[in-house]
Image: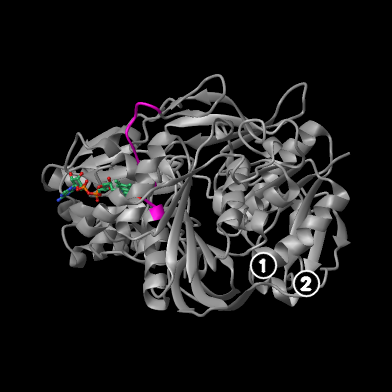
């Protein structure tokens, strides 16, 4: 089983600057990390290849520094790492990004599964996974919380949805996006780190993946960020101190009155 | 006149509330643009009177495709109907819910149709002069608001969260044109739905809940977490949890609120024994009212709270439960 896992470098904290002109994120000079939700995609892929044989290839699109997250994935057990990096990729929205990744996946070739995290913690869109499936015409199963069965032709999995867990069977090759429930991610091992140091990361540019120039970067992105604002937190907090029984009772009653006033208490059914 | 569309969602033949919320947003846009508003319904069947409700909440046109296969969602069966429908009618805007369904379907359609999509919009407006859709969404853990548009591509697509907007006025005298759509025969769907296993603890999802009561590490141990469950029940709400509480096994992952859990917009959010780490706050920035119970009067969570009771939760919650109970008895 050959599994491709697209991963993303995200800022370590949520404290990110935006370029006021292009509306894209400014990342340089800030510490970055592997998107924490991608760890679950990697773990799901490792468990499948450990159980059924095969290998995991990781791919990322991003600046030079994104090589670090590929190293991290290699040290956890990925066998091959591909870094899509080229100036024209810059400024890609989710449409252009999913196009670039789909071109790379096509070039990697002969895969059974593509597994992504649920979403990246910076953009928070959850659009790239489904987008890749659309470009490649793959069966798409999102929000996967467990994989029950995997054969060379299909997979039985559960999705975490609003009503509960939806059980599905999907024909391979397919694309899955996974949620945190799928497994507990492993840590890189010392042996893995050594192996990662010795491995080379392949660098591909727009030409290598035969990307259509009109579909990549800012130019290939249908969406434009036209304004960025920092919302002012308008809340002012009313504080009640519950020191001692009397104060506690008073505080609780204030709260109940307030909730009642705003009709936030459960409807009381008469009779 | 290119229409504004909303994608309705159904469950067992009934329309979900979010379908009407989308109409409230869509109605405002359609009025501004002076174009018809349409709602698209894909369902195994629709209960008597359901489509009339869409009209009452603002739909001028209702496209309905009924087929057994829509009893449960697969992106492929939905896209097979929607792609030709969009190509035939050329709507200028498509709005869907930011649910597991909408967030799967729309990015898939966006690529197939070659157009832009903005997830989780908190407000939508029409740009003066150009008529472009302005899509406003929180980004980077809610620390900034970004306005996004898609000037050269149609349709313009956006999702918004359930409960992020109030329902519009209902007018039962309104009528809509119902257009039945024959679902094209889909030779093979790569995804086959085998069934649905409801949540073990009978919870509805916290994203749909009007009230969410969350507990964190301040609860100290599993047994104490029942206080959260009792309070949620007393308030007719659902149970949420911080990551620390989920990691300790006090609540299951579907209850986790925050960056790596769920983003929710309930009417009322009560955070108990939760410090308010930035990752937790990311999940509740759009909650309407936030109540805090914490013994630390400098906890981060107070920055975004409306009301806080500062003190020992183990002393406060039993009193709160008792008073709620007394109130119920006296009514
Ligand atoms: C990548 C990443 C993703 C993350 N995602 C999430 C996420 O999705 N959701 C999330 O919640 N966290 C997330 N976290 C973790 C987050 O950083 C915090 O560690 C976590 O939210 C803390 O949980 P807590 O508030 O329950 O615990 P604590 O921070 O330990 O807070 C406990 C609170 O309880 C109060 N308390 C203690 N005893 C009492 C008492 N007797 N009475 C009243 N109050 C009391 C304390 O004053 C304190 O404020 C994430 C972290 C990372 C790095």
Percent across and percent down for residue B244 are 25, 54
Pointer 2 residue: B186
Instruction: Determine whether the residue tagged by mark 2 lies in a helix, strand or loop.
Output: loop
**Compared with residue A117, is residue A95 higher up or lower down, i.e. above or below?**
above
Instruction: Determine whether the residue tagged by mark 1 lies in a helix, strand or loop.
Output: strand
Percent across and percent down for residue A42 are 39, 59
| Residue A34 falls within the magenta-colored stretch | yes
Q: Nearer the viewer, residue A235 or A25?
A: A25
Looking at the image, which residue is at 80% across and 33% down?
A: B33
Percent across and percent down for residue A30 are 34, 29
**Compared with residue B325, is residue B118 higher up or lower down, i.e. above or below?**
above
Q: Quadrant of residue A91?
A: top right
Q: Nearer the viewer, residue A203 or B202?
A: A203
Magenta-drawn stretch, dominant element (helix, strand or loop): loop
Crowdedness of circle 1 by 10 Å Cα count: few (<14), some, many (20+)? Answer: some
Pointer 1 residue: B14
Residue B57 visible to an observer of this rendering = no
| Residue B47 falls within the magenta-colored stretch | no
Q: Quadrant of residue B143?
A: top left
Q: Which mark is residue A15?
A: none
Is B205 on the left-hand or right-hand side of A127? left
**Compared with residue A234, is residue B28 higher up or lower down, i.e. above or below?**
below
């Amino acid at each position: 089983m050959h599994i491709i896992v697209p991963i993303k470098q995200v800022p370590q904290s949520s404290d990110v600057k935006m370029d006021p002109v292009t509306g894209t994120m400014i990342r340089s000079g800030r510490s970055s990390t592997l998107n924490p939700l991608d760890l679950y995609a990697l773990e799901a892929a490792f468990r499948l290849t450990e159980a059924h044989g095969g290998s995991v290839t990781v791919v990322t699109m991003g600046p030079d520094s994104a090589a670090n997250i590929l190293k991290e994935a290699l040290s956890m057990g990925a066998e091959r790492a591909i870094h899509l990096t080229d100036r024209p990729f810059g400024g890609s929205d989710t449409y252009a990004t999913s196009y670039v990744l789909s071109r790379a996946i096509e070039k990697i070739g002969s895969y059974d599964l593509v597994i992504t995290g649920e979403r990246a913690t910076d953009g928070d869109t959850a659009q790239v996974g489904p987008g890749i499936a659309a470009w490649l015409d793959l069966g798409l199963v999102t929000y996967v919380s467990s994989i029950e069965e995997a054969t060379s032709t299909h997979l039985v999995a559960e999705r975490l949805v609003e009503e509960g867990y939806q059980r599905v069977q999907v024909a391979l090759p397919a694309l899955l996006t996974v949620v945190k429930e799928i497994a507990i991610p492993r840590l890189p091992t010392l042996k893995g780190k050594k192996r990662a140091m010795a491995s080379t990361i392949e660098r591909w540019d727009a030409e290598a993946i035969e990307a259509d120039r009109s579909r990549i970067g800012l130019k290939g992105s249908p969406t434009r960020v036209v304004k960025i604002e920092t919302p002012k937190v308008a809340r002012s907090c009313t504080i009640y101190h519950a020191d001692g029984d009397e104060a506690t009772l008073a505080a609780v009653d204030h709260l109940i009155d307030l909730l009642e006033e705003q009709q936030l208490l459960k409807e009381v059914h008469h009779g | 006149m290119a229409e504004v569309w909303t994608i309705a969602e159904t469950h067992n033949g009934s329309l979900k509330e979010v379908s009407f919320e989308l109409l409230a947003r869509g109605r405002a846009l359609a009025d501004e643009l002076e174009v018809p508003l349409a709602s698209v319904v894909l369902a195994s069947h629709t209960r008597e009177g359901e489509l009339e409700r869409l009209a009452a909440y603002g739909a001028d046109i209702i496209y309905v495709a009924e087929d057994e296969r829509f009893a449960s969602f697969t992106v492929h069966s939905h896209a097979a109907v929607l792609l030709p429908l969009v190509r035939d009618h050329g709507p200028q805007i498509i709005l869907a819910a930011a649910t597991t369904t909408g967030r799967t379907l729309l990015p898939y359609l966006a690529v197939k149709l070659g157009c832009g999509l903005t997830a989780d919009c908190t407000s939508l407006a029409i740009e003066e002069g150009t008529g472009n859709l302005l899509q406003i969404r929180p980004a980077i853990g809610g620390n900034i608001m970004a306005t996004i548009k898609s000037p050269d591509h149609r349709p313009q697509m956006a999702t918004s969260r359930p409960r992020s907007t109030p329902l519009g006025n209902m007018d039962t005298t309104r009528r809509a044109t119902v257009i039945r759509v024959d679902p094209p025969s889909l030779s093979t769907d790569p995804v086959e739905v085998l069934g649905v296993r409801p949540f073990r603890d009978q919870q509805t999802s916290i994203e749909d809940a009007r009230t969410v009561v969350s507990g964190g590490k301040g609860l100290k141990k599993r047994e104490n977490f029942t206080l959260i469950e009792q309070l949620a029940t007393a308030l007719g709400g659902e149970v949420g949890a911080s990551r620390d509480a989920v990691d300790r096994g006090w609540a299951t992952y579907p209850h986790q609120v925050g960056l790596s859990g769920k983003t929710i917009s309930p009417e009322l959010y009560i955070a108990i024994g939760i410090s308010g780490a930035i990752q937790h706050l990311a999940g509740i920035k759009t909650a309407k009212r936030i109540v805090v119970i914490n013994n630390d009067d400098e906890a981060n969570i107070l920055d975004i709270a409306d009301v806080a009771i500062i003190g020992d939760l183990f002393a406060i919650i039993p009193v709160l439960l008792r008073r709620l109970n007394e109130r119920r008895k006296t009514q």
